[in-house]
Image (cartoon, grey):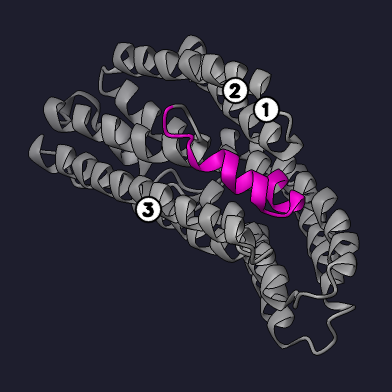
Amino acid sequence: MIEIALIVVPLLLAAAAVVWPVERTRPWLLPIGGTVHVLLVAALLAHPSAAPVDAWLGFDAVARAVLPMVSILFLICSGYAVSYLRIRADQSNRVFVAMLLSLHALFSFALQARHLGLLWIGVEAATLLTVPLLHFNNTARAIEATWKYLIVGGTGVALSLLGSFCLGYASLHGGGSGDLTFAGLASQGPALSRPWLVAAWVLLLAGYGTKMGLAPMHTWKPDAYGEAPGVVGAILAGGATTIAFVAVLRVKQVVDAAGGGAMTERTLLAFGLFSMVVAALYLLATQDFKRMLAYSSVEHMGILAVGAALGGA
């Protein structure tokens, strides 16, 4: 029940934000939603419930480790957002507040997703909800950054969808059951068709790696973070990219179970080290604080990729 509430409560508050009549008080829905979410997360961790192995939704150990960080980050950012939107009284905050709350719900949904298709829906729906947030300042550079995010992010959407199809076909072609839950795919292990499995890993890493901002798929980050409100950049850096990393881990666990551990470790190590080098070089060359956050996020994603490669996650 708590798992569903983590999704439903932010969505209900997002709906309330759409019909809320007073601009000045509407932003307070953000810290209200953030506080309720943190309390629900605390209750979930205090009284964990074991979802069936073949369930499509449910928190596992990885999700339980990430969820509190994402929840606390949103609560902190929501407090700042109230002050920020008060200063930006020239702009209507209706869409901004509704999209932030909806994005928070999608983070909870994506973390719970134990099905390949549901994970794709959660991660990619977050891409669409981010667009109005990036466009909030409505300047020429903000519009350019939004379009770049859409084009690069849309490419990631297409690649990850194609990779999901390949992984599903790897199960069917190898004589598997076609079960697309991650537990079901991992249980099929060596029965998965090797060529289709390799294609799936390459495409899914490229697709979700784009959402993470791994180099060289990071090109959307500097402009998006630089032109979006600071609170949006912080939530993208600590929330959206982290969810994409969890998606990569889910796929890695399936490929590893099929005997592809050496391949996943080599590719993650290569992308991780390359991201760290690229981020370090660009950090030395920029003075803009929000762009520094973007390159710092690229570096952090690289560190996570290296950790996953060396740690055998």
Q: Quadrant of residue 103?
A: bottom right
Residue 124 on image: x %, y %: 44, 55
Real-space CA distance between mark 1 and mark 3, rounded to the nearest whole angstrom: 27 Å
Residue 197 on image: x %, y %: 20, 30
Q: Is residue 280 above or below residue 109?
A: above
Circle 3 Cα neighbour tier, 10 Å, few/some/many (<14 / 14–19 / ≥20): some
Q: Residue at x 82, y 54 (%)?
A: 39
**What type is the residue that disc 2 sits on?**
Tyr
- Say the numbered circle drawn on residue 282: 2
Q: Residue at x 79, y 64 (%)?
A: 33
- Say the numbered circle drawn on residue 286: 1
Q: Quadrant of residue 271?
A: top left
Element assignment for label 3: helix
In this rendering, position of residue 284 left or right of residue 36: left
In this rendering, position of residue 213 left or right of residue 34: left
The answer to whether residue 115 is visible is no
Real-space CA distance between mark 2 and mark 3, rounded to the nearest whole angstrom: 24 Å
Viewer-closest of 274 and 212: 274
Circle 2 Cα neighbour tier, 10 Å, few/some/many (<14 / 14–19 / ≥20): some
Q: What is the chief secondary structure element of the magenta stretch?
A: helix
- Say the numbered circle drawn on residue 74: none
Q: Which residues are magenta?
A: 216-234
**What type is the residue that disc 1 sits on?**
Thr
